[in-house]
Amino acid sequence: MSAAPATGASILVAEDEPEIRANLQRLLRLEGYRVSVVADGRAALAALQAHTPDLLLTDAMMPELDGETLLRMLRAEARYRALPVLLLTARADAEDRARALQAGASAVVTKPFQRAVLLDCIRGLLAGDSA
């Protein structure tokens, strides 16, 4: 198991699938992150108004407000332009990845994800790297 982050960084997870949301919350907490979870993009916007986390991890396809639309809305506001955003997507092709990056994703990870890949990506984003 990897070492917990020294900073105890905060991560907001926006994921509509309850099982995936719970698994992400459990995994990230075990890694030492402070984790908040919401079930959709609208709830993510509300949570961001109350507290800006160190990283947003969002699903691409959610009801109400999908991940790409959420990204575009966030990147339009100055206070969220530097917020690292990791987009989880079930779509694995290069065109979907490019569209997500154009929308403002800092990185994209394909579902189902491997634990090590996800955690390495999160560590990199929190350290200031883009993927």
Image (spheres, rainbow, N blue to C red):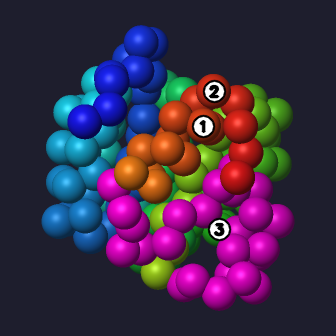
| Residue 40 figure quarter | bottom left
**Disc 1 versus disc 2: distance between alpha carbons?**
5 Å
Identify the residue at horizontal 33%, vertical 23% (top origin).
4
**Image position, residue 109 (x, y; %):** 53, 64
Q: Nearer the viewer, residue 41 or 92?
A: 92
Q: Which mark is residue 127?
A: 2
**Image position, residue 35 (x, y; %):** 32, 34
Q: Are marks 1 and 2 in contact (CB under 8 Å)?
A: yes
**Image position, residue 30 (x, y; %):** 21, 33
Q: In the shown orientation, is residue 27 left or right of residue 62?
A: left
- Magenta range is 91-115
User: Label 2 is placed on what type of residue?
Assistant: Ala
Which residue is denoted by mark 1 in the rendering? 124
Q: Nearer the viewer, residue 71 or 91?
A: 91
Q: SS of the residue at dot 1?
A: helix
Q: SS of the residue at dot 3?
A: helix
**Disc 3 versus disc 1: distance between alpha carbons?**
21 Å
- Judge the density around disc 2: few (<14), some (14-19), many (≥20) Cα neighbours within 10 Å: few
Which residue is denoted by mark 3 in the rendering? 68
- Judge the density around disc 3: few (<14), some (14-19), many (≥20) Cα neighbours within 10 Å: many
**Residue placed furthest toward the top:** 6
In the rendered view, would you say 76 is above or below 67? above
Q: Which image quarter is the N terminus in?
A: top left
Identify the residue at horizontal 25%, vertical 64% (top origin).
20
- Judge the density around disc 1: few (<14), some (14-19), many (≥20) Cα neighbours within 10 Å: some
